[in-house]
Amino acid sequence: MKTISTLLVLMLFSCGNKLKEGRIINKFYEPSKYYTFSEYNPSLKTVVMRNVYDDEDYVFIVSNIIENDTITERFEVSYTTYNSFSIGNWIKFDN
């Protein structure tokens, strides 16, 4: 449960990555999936069900200290990059 909570916090507050480099503290694969959610449509004045497809993701959770603050962010990486690095490795991102 702690891992899920941590990931939700990371996803909610990570609007663009601040980190350019850091230590990989976790890595995981998210398989593709379909999910359904409902939302209220004000013009139709009704609830509409939406089906969404989320493709697979290879994810690194990366952490670094910047100006005395520990920053932890989620990065989606390619399959090749995912297999080239291990937890504990230092990684630098181009962008």
Image (spheres, helix red, strand yellow):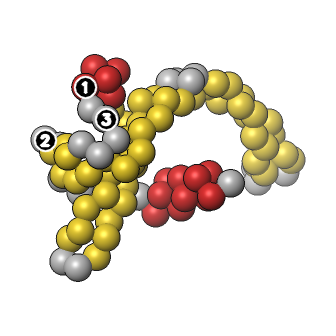
Residue under numbered circle 1: 84
Residue 56 seen in render: yes
Which residue is painted at 53% across and 30% down in the image?
A: 30
Amino acid tagged 1: Ser
Residue under numbered circle 3: 86
In the rendered structure, which disc, 2 or 3, sits on the residue that comes first in sequence? 3
Question: 35 or 30: which is nearer to us?
Answer: 30
Amino acid tagged 3: Ser
Give percent across and percent down for residue 24. Answer: 31, 47
Q: Tell me if label 3 and label 1 are in contact, CB under 8 Å.
A: no
89 over 13 or under it: above or below: above
Residue under numbered circle 2: 94
Q: Tell me if label 2 and label 1 are in contact, CB under 8 Å.
A: no
Which image quarter: residue 19?
bottom left
At mark 3, the secondary structure is: loop
Give percent across and percent down for residue 12. Answer: 52, 59
6 relative position to 24: left or right: right
- CA gap, disc 2 and disc 3: 19 Å
Which image quarter: residue 67?
bottom left
16 over 28 or under it: above or below: below
Amino acid tagged 2: Asp
